[in-house]
Image (tube, grey):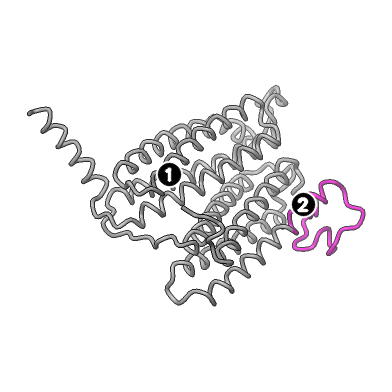
């Protein structure tokens, strides 16, 4: 387990950068939910052609604040990268985490800039915007994963060992991919909720094909959420019985209950017609669930246990059958 008082200054800073990035992500969601993405016009990195906008509207303040906080988050990752490369030697796992953290932070900034420069914000209703929003969310999750691993490894987490993991690796990998797909579908659904609020459209037949697609996709996100959640809960329970290290057990329970709570929040979000405050809570919980899944996977894959998930499961079944025969 991690205790903040025992962490180095670098580790505390790394966890702090992760928390700040979550806050920036939530503010970005607020920008989208309030339709403030065009608050600075199609200018980037300037806002309406100015470094600091004069007499700004509310939408401009929201968007400009997001740009400022995003810039702070970017330079914090740069600082983390420089500090980490000085502190840890070549080939250290923290350096790997830092490399990918910087990589996904750069792509995050580029995607955000693209949304503004190509005017895929505000009231824009296009399939291009939906695709970019999905890609944006996937990149965000990969950024959070990289920052999480960086913080975890700098806090004493063991490096990942892929050899001998067998089906465990494939099972976790499939679950992580499922979560990325779930996140992408959630981003598209949230976009549809923003552009076409539930109950505000009486006749969708008069809308454009893209608008109708965004509205019809609402049903797929809950379905994907249920499928992915059931799969992950089953896999996590099975893995917990194989890898019995205390941190793995703790994280497995934390992930399971957080995921169940997230499903409840998702249902509540639909029930309330996706108000902005509920969207933000839902996104925050999604980030937390994702981070815990990454920590759980990293701990499992760092264990030296040689038996694979399949071998253990088969052995357990054989033992059960033998007992029944006796």
Answer whether residue 56 is magenta in the image: yes
* Res 322 → quadrant: top left
Mark 1 residue crowding within 10 angstroms, few (<14) / some (14–19) / many (20+): some
Residue 63: mark in rendering: 2
The residue shown at (34%, 46%) is 171
In front of the other: 261 or 139: 261
Answer whether residue 44 is magenta in the image: yes
Residue that protrudes farthest toward the left in the picture: 326
User: Could you say whether the residue bearing mark 2 is in a helix, strand or loop?
Assistant: helix
The residue shown at (38%, 41%) is 236
The residue shown at (58%, 49%) is 137
Residue 188 visible in this rendered orientation of the protein: yes
Residue that protrudes farthest toward the top in the picture: 202
Q: Position of residue 181 (x, y in %)?
A: 49, 44
Residue that protrudes farthest toward the front in the picture: 5
Q: Position of residue 139 (x, y in %)?
A: 55, 54
Using residue 19 as the reference point, say whether residue 146 is left or right of it: left
Image height check: is 203 above or below 123?
above
Q: Position of residue 251 (x, y in %)?
A: 44, 45
Q: CA distance from mark 1 to mark 2?
A: 39 Å
User: Could you say whether the residue bearing mark 1 is in a helix, strand or loop?
Assistant: helix
* Res 242 → quadrant: top left
Using residue 197 as the reference point, say whether residue 101 is left or right of it: left
Residue that protrudes farthest toward the right in the picture: 55
Task: Find the magenta span and give its range.
Answer: 40-68
Image height check: is 60 above or below 238?
below
- The prevailing secondary structure element of the residues shown in magenta is loop
Location of mark 1 (residue):
250
Quadrant assignment for the C terminus:
top left
């Amino acid at each position: 387990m991690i205790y903040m008082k025992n962490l180095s200054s670098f580790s505390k800073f790394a966890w702090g950068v992760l928390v700040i990035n979550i806050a920036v992500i939530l503010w970005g969601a607020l920008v989208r939910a309030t339709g403030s993405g065009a608050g600075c016009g199609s200018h980037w990195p300037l806002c309406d052609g100015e470094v600091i906008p004069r007499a700004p509207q509310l939408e401009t303040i929201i968007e400009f604040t997001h740009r400022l906080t995003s810039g702070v988050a970017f330079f914090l990752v740069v600082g983390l990268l420089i500090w980490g490369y000085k502190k840890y030697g070549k080939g250290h796992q923290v350096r790997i985490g830092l490399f990918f953290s910087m990589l996904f932070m750069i792509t995050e900034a580029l995607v955000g800039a693209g949304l503004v420069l190509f005017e895929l914000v505000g009231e824009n209703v296009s399939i291009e915007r939906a695709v970019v929003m999905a890609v944006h969310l996937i990149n965000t999750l990969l950024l959070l994963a990289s920052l999480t691993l960086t913080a975890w490894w700098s806090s004493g987490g063991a490096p990942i060992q892929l050899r001998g993991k067998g089906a465990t690796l494939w099972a976790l990998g499939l679950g992580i991919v499922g979560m990325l797909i779930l996140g992408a579908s959630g981003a598209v659904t949230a976009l549809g909720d923003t552009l076409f609020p539930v109950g505000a459209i009486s006749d969708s037949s008069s809308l454009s094909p893209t608008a109708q697609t965004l509205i019809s996709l609402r049903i797929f996100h809950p379905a994907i959420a249920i499928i992915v959640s059931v799969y992950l809960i089953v896999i996590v329970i099975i893995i917990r019985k194989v890898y019995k290290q205390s941190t793995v057990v703790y994280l497995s329970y934390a992930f399971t209950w957080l995921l169940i709570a997230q499903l409840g929040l998702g249902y509540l979000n639909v029930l309330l017609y996706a108000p902005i405050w509920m969207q933000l809570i839902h996104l925050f919980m999604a980030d937390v669930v994702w981070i815990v899944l990454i920590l759980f996977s990293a701990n499992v894959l760092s264990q030296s246990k040689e038996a694979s998930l399949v071998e253990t499961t088969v052995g357990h079944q054989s033992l059960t059958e033998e007992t029944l025969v006796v």
